[in-house]
Amino acid sequence: MAGSLQTQIAERLTQIRQTLPESVKLIAVTKQVSAEVMRAAYAAGVRDFGESRIQETLDKQAQLADLPNITWHFIGHLQSNKAAKALELFQWIHSVDSLKLAQRLNQIAAAPIAADLSQKPMLCLQVKVLPDPTKYGWTIPELLHDLPALDQCTHLNIVGLMAIPPYGIDPSETLGVFTRTRDLAAQIQQDEPKIKHLKMQELSMGMSDDYRLAVAAGATMIRLGRTLFGDRPEIF
Ligand SMILES: *Cc1c(COP(=O)(O)O)cnc(C)c1O
């Protein structure tokens, strides 16, 4: 049973990877996926897991504690009161969505109690290049405004942008969201001489339905759930 699941996931991974440049990091999104299935994915070669809830991740990390070299990616909305826990559990946070949250994370990472963090957390900033009342994140003008303050968060490794297109738009608009995000990262990198610390080399964009468009636009990390593990129950 576990063997055939592993084979199935391995086949899907192989199919997807064949279409990707080697430099693109594939993150397996395992929210609502059981630890048993994650174990099969691990056996199939997955080392990057994406989760959107703290408690679910705590449970799974306990169940998978025997598996070495997993990189955990947080991809959901993070409440400030869970920021410290998120830094303990995750090496990456893709979904930093406000200056307040970034400053809170920076403050925690700076504190002596955080000294056992093996490395500075890797973060992306979530941007909304189209209006989207259902999502958190910066609009482009808001992000440009907050950049100097974000650049002061020197205990964090801010390394790029994360984008999720609004639900239900057509493929050309979706591609537009991804190219606009890429261009924004390039613009920040080139045109902001006052930015000393933060970097814009990573683009976390693309999910099961749109990752091909995201990769075409230059995504460096894609976050795939359903295409690897099948549909999730609709409990969100
Ligand atoms: C759930 C989720 C994904 C994965 O979505 P799929 O459509 O299952 O590939 C990717 N990114 C974020 C932020 C998510 O919440």
Image (tube, rainbow, N blue to C red):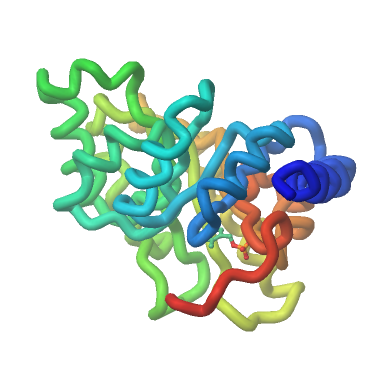
Q: Quadrant of residue 181?
A: bottom right
**Residue located at (28% from left, 35% from top):** 87
Q: Quadrant of residue 103?
A: top left
Question: 69 or 197: which is nearer to us?
Answer: 69
Work out whether 29 lies above or below 173. Answer: above
**Residue located at (40% from left, 52% from top):** 95
- Would residue 147 be seen by someone viewing this image from the given angle? yes
Judged from this view, the residue extending furthest toward the bottom is 168
Work out whether 100 lies above or below 130. Answer: above
**Residue located at (39% from left, 80% from top):** 133
Left or right: residue 151 compared with residue 45: left
Which quadrant: the C terminus? Answer: bottom left
- In percent of width and height, residue 119 lies at 35, 19
Judged from this view, the residue extending furthest toward the front is 1
- In percent of width and height, residue 130 lies at 51, 72
- Would residue 220 be seen by someone viewing this image from the given angle? no
- In percent of width and height, residue 214 lies at 70, 55
Quadrant containing ligand 1 reads bottom right
Left or right: residue 167 compared with residue 9: left
